[in-house]
């Protein structure tokens, strides 16, 4: 068994330490590589195993990436590399994990020029797993000129899971990265997304939905680095907190010197279903360039009395109202899943949580 101990989700512009929001700490273990179920690889995508180094940083941070590299080296795991051919227009590729114990997955996606591809990662745990276990995934994307890659991750793990999901992407001129993330299962969840918009006119579109309940917690970090001119980013997060759940979200848009003409937008909306939840949100814009446009914001609140009265007057009890509003939060991301059976599974899983 190989242990992973690392400070993760380091905030790039540190604030007061007593707020306990600058970073968090990940403690977990890995014993083997997680074996995915891939029904068929669509035309235009080639799957190989590679030991070649990948320079793409992921959202949980450089310290995490270095530690995970050491662990997968000790376990003799070679990353799975998906190469998308130049000019290929690929059907969505579904990659499903049925987790049976402490395991990790390492994925590299190389999207050649002018290609279009979608990758769906689904994480489930076997029902007989009753004790605490860890499952982690790292996904790194290299998008060449005018390539477009959509990454979808769906966490449907059991309630005893410690889970980390770390995503990183580098975008060349005209390239587009898209991330859709649903964090619904698990006991301790660590999520990070790091996007480098290095190319002229490169783009990022992202959205995430989560439901955290009981005494579980979720720690999220999204960072977009604008260094290419006329680059664009937009990211939205929608979530539900219930019971005594805890959640931290850090969102950063970083306009580097020279990225003139760029724009970025990050927003979070949180529904609080209990007075005992703990919610921390930190949306930040860092600016080293004048000719840019940035927007950020966050809102958090409970079910309003007017909304509750309106829906009760139409026959919905309070529990039904809570479920409807929670489903609406999840639906904001689920509608971007290009697999209707998986989208319905997500909706059903979310409804059982609240």
Image (cartoon, rainbow, N blue to C red):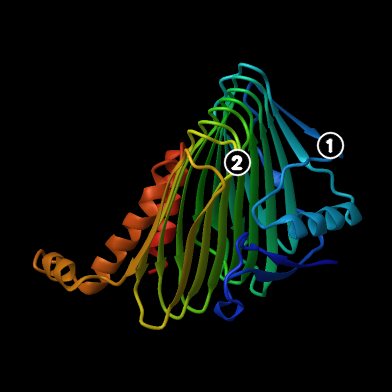
Residue located at (36% from left, 79% from top) = 274
Quadrant in the rendering for residue 63? bottom right
Compared to residue 354, the image places residue 208 above or below, namely above
Q: Nearer the viewer, residue 311 or 129?
A: 311
Q: CA distance from mark 2 to mark 1?
A: 35 Å
What x and y, as percent, mark residue 150? 54, 36
Report helix, strand or loop for mark 1.
Answer: loop
Q: Is residue 324 visible?
A: yes
The residue furthest top is 87
Q: Quadrant of the N terminus?
A: bottom right
The residue furthest left is 313
What x and y, as percent, mark residue 280? 48, 71
Q: Is residue 32 visible?
A: no
Q: Is residue 149 left or right of residue 78?
A: left
Residue located at (18% from left, 70% from top) = 308
Residue located at (77% from left, 41% from top) = 55
Quadrant in the rendering for residue 200? top right
Residue pointed to by mark 1: 50
Label 1: how many residues lie within 10 Å, few (<14), some (14-19) or many (20+)? some
- The nearer-to-camera label among 2 and 1 is 2
Residue pointed to by mark 2: 257
Residue located at (15% from left, 65% from top) = 311
What x and y, as percent, mark residue 50? 84, 36
Contact between labelled residues 1 and 2, with CB atoms less than 8 Å apart: no
Report helix, strand or loop for mark 2.
Answer: loop
What x and y, as percent, mark residue 292? 47, 40
Compared to residue 121, the image places residue 109 above or below, namely above
Determine which of the numbered discs, if any, sits on residue 167 in the image: none
């Amino acid at each position: 068994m190989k242990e992973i101990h690392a400070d993760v989700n380091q905030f790039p512009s540190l604030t007061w330490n007593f707020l306990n929001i600058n970073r968090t700490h990940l403690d977990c273990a890995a014993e083997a590589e997680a074996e995915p179920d891939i029904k068929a690889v669509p035309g235009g995508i080639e799957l190989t195993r590679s030991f070649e180094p990948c320079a793409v940083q992921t959202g949980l941070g450089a310290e995490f990436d270095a530690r995970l590299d050491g662990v997968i080296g000790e376990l003799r795991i070679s990353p799975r590399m998906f190469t998308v051919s130049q000019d290929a227009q690929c059907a969505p590729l579904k990659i499903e994990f049925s987790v049976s114990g402490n395991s990790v997955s390492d994925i590299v996606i190389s999207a050649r020029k002018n290609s279009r591809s979608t990758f769906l990662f689904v994480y489930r745990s076997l029902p007989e797993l009753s004790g605490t276990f860890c499952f982690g995934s790292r996904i790194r994307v290299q998008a060449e000129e005018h390539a477009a890659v959509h990454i979808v991750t769906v966490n449907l793990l059991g309630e005893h899971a410690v889970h980390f999901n770390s995503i990183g992407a580098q975008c060349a001129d005209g390239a587009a990265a898209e991330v859709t993330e649903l964090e619904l299962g698990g006991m301790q969840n660590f999520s990070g997304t790091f996007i480098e918009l290095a190319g002229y006119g490169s783009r990022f579109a992202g959205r995430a939905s989560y439901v955290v309940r009981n005494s579980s917690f979720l720690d999220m970090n999204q960072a977009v680095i604008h260094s290419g001119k006329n680059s664009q980013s937009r990211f939205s997060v929608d979530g539900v907190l219930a019971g005594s759940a805890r959640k931290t979200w850090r969102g950063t848009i970083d306009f580097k010197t020279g990225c003139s003409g760029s724009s970025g937008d990050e927003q979070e909306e949180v529904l609080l279903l209990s007075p005992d939840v703990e919610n921390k949100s930190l949306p930040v814009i860092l600016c080293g360039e004048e000719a840019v446009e940035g927007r950020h914001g966050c809102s958090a609140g409970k079910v309003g009395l007017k909304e509750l009265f309106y829906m009760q007057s139409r026959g919905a009890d309070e529990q039904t109202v809570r479920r409807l509003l929670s489903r609406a939060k999840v639906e904001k991301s689920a509608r971007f899943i290009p697999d209707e059976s998986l989208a319905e599974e997500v909706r059903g899983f979310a409804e059982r949580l609240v």
